Image: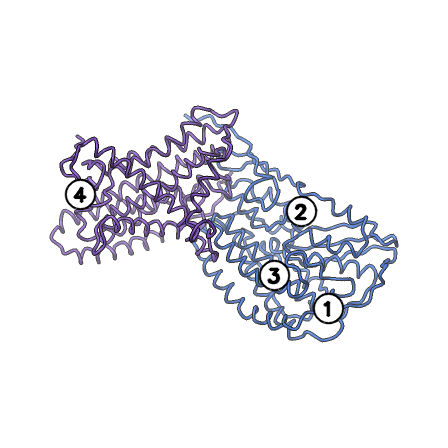
Chain colours: A blue, B purple
Amino acid sequence: MALKTELFVINLGPLHPSTHGVFRMLATMDGEVIVELEPVFGYLHRGIEKLAENRTYKQNIPFTDRMDYIASMSNELSYVMAVEKLAGIQVPERAEYLRVIMAELQRIASHLIAVGSLANDLGAFQTPFLYMFRERERILDLFDMVCGQRLLYNYMRFGGVSHDIPDEFLPALKKLLKHFPGFIAEYDQLLADNEILLARTKGIGVLPKKLAISSSASGPVLRASGVKWDIRKADPYSVYDRFDFDIPTGSAGDCYDRYRVRIAEMYQSIRILNQAIEQLPSGNVLNKVPLRFRPPVGEAFAHIEAPKGELGFYIVSDGSEKPYRFHVRSSILINLTALRDMIIGWKLADAIVTFGSIDICLGEVDR
Amino acid sequence: MMQFAPQELLWSGNFWLHLLLFAGMIITFILLMVMFFIWYERRLIGRFQVRLGPNRAGPFGLLQPVADVLKILTKEDIVPSKGDKIVFWLAPIIALAPVFMMFAVIPLQGNALLVDLNIGILYIIAVSSVASIGIFMAGWGSYNKYSLIGAMRDVAQLISYEIPLVLSIVGVVLIAGSLSLNDIVEAQTVPFILLQPLGFLIFFIGSLAEINRTPFDLVEADSEIVAGYNIEYSGMKFATFFLMEYAEALTSSAIITTLFLGGWKGPFLPPFLWFIIKVIAVFSLIVWVRSTIPRFRIDQVMAFAWKFLLPLALINLLLTSMQVVFFQEASSLVIIISSLVIMAALILIWSKFFRLGGNSTGL
């Protein structure tokens, strides 16, 4: 005789230890298995897009920091690139290199958190997470050296960066780069062959190639599904065309591949950083931009390969001091749209891991 | 039939006075050790996680558990309005009591135990399962989906892991020739971990599952079901559950010490100290596992018990029986080496057959 069972709805979030912020998943469960899932977001909505329309272009730079607060430098870079495109501002070569250095350091810092918190979602009691934070601390120290801030940098400017790097920055960076590959290898060695980690991530939360493309996913999530797509190569911005690096891709599109792709990308970032230090020219870092900055009427879109995916800014100018429209193409929000298809049919524990492997930051999803 | 043996006690005074005094001693011992364990685990995990751990309250943060207890006692005691109030109230007590009861038959040193039951180990197995009823009651009475999932997981886990756990104990009992824990310790001229390495591993893993420690902490998996069965508990009742968890870890360490590590036996130091040292060593192992290994999924936990541990436990039982029947005369060195080799071979062979798969549930 079969037992009479019922489906029940469980409300994961908005306050839940593994939602990486305030995200809510309405999961309909059959025992431990999720049969239906409805992602609900918007709990951290601060109306950044609307608020930005009431502030001058320059005032919006620190605003963009507060979107994906784990990768502030990337947000700034994308925004200043959009405005520079709009107003046709030239950037000195040294500033371009500094931007690349900051963006790649930021990518490593962001991936460290992504990988660490994935292990946290798997139930490894905080240890990998804290190891990652220890290493991220070194990168934050570098940022601190450059702009005096550790989380929200406000470093990029239209036409360059706010300060040149101090003298002690490059030696410190070189030392870090020397130490880092060994550290990543050590960490990878500790985690990658762990039977439980393999069992919990391999084949879990698969995002098929076709679905990944049609849902316009980007970043490591897309590349783990086997699509070789990276804005740095596909539409080179800044000085990325001068560097030699690979695009790591996965094949299965499962949580494990997403983890592997992030680890591999950290190595590539280190490669880029090493080349950038070698090629770093001297000179001016900031071109003069008028104090009362009014870009001409028009519109511009600039996108970069942020740590979490393709981050784009669409700016419409009506010729005044403030943007007429300020739109963000959030990488994480669009990566999240495939969440339901990735999770349905899996167990509750898998849902958490899959969700964590997308690497989200609610500050950018809700804006 | 159960038999008490009061005349063999270390201190042969009045029987009832002995019961009363020793019960008081055991409770004090457990509470003190739990306080120490809470501090010790946090410090140790701190070291594992490249940080310091609590070091503010008192020297080396030793008073941290005291501060925790004071804080937790001043918390508001919340009872869910739709919960089953009686079940909700009873659950922490039912979960805690058996953990204390288990200590009645564990010898703290030679003959120093509350009652020397001739079926001691059977008693422990029986009583330890009762704690799960308390956990299930907590999950049921809370009227909360998370806690219900946690409670269900606990019961499923307990039923699965009880079997390899008991089978691995049988090996020890076969060699010692007695069910009384006191006799088992006396029989260990060589610690049974050397004669029964496979049994020790199975028992250790089973104990981790029994006390809901990583990698089997699905019952309170904080990243999945927040806190599991105790999600609705606060104040004193939560403290009771907290105490229960650490007391369970303490009892498990004590049982492992008694069964496999030679109990209170040891050179130079007084036996009681040896017992505590070994218990702390086992607990350190548990903490080490907790701080380094991620969590299983529920079906993997089940598969691990039924497909990996149970066959190994059966083989171990068979080999031990053969050893006891046919190789009674063999020197212990031969047995130690052969059982280590057999363990390594078995685990290697079995892990070739058994892989934890990551397959969809085919919905």
Between marks 3 and 4, how big is the CA–CA gap? 60 Å
Q: Residue at x 61, y 37 (%)?
A: A38
Determine the secondary structure under disc 2.
helix
Which marked residue is nearer to the observer: mark 2 or mark 4? 4
Q: Residue furthest front?
A: B58
Q: Label 3 belongs to which residue?
A: A140
Horizontal relation, residue B29 to residue A42: left or right: left
Image quadrant occupied by the N terminus of chain A: top left
Q: Earlier in the sequence, mark 3 or mark 1?
A: 1
Horizontal relation, residue A366 to residue B204: left or right: right
Q: For residue A336, which numbered disc appears in the image?
A: none
Which marked residue is nearer to the observer: mark 4 or mark 1? 4
Determine the secondary structure under disc 1.
helix
For this rendering, which residue is in front, B168 or B42? Answer: B42
Between marks 2 and 1, how big is the CA–CA gap? 29 Å
Quadrant in which residue A249 is drawn: bottom right
Q: Label 4 belongs to which residue?
A: B183
Badge 3 and badge 4 in a common chain: no
Mark 2 neighbour class, 10 Å CA radius: few under 14, some 14 to 19, many 20 or more? many
Between marks 2 and 3, how big is the CA–CA gap? 23 Å
Callout 2–callout 4 Cβ contact below 8 Å: no
Q: Which amino acid type is shown beneath numbered disc 1? A: Ala
Which marked residue is nearer to the observer: mark 2 or mark 3? 3
Q: Label 1 belongs to which residue?
A: A95
Between marks 2 and 4, how big is the CA–CA gap? 64 Å
Badge 2 and badge 4 in a common chain: no
Mark 1 neighbour class, 10 Å CA radius: few under 14, some 14 to 19, many 20 or more? many
Residue A322 rendering spot, x and y as whole percentages: 83, 52
Q: Which amino acid type is shown beneath numbered disc 2? A: Val
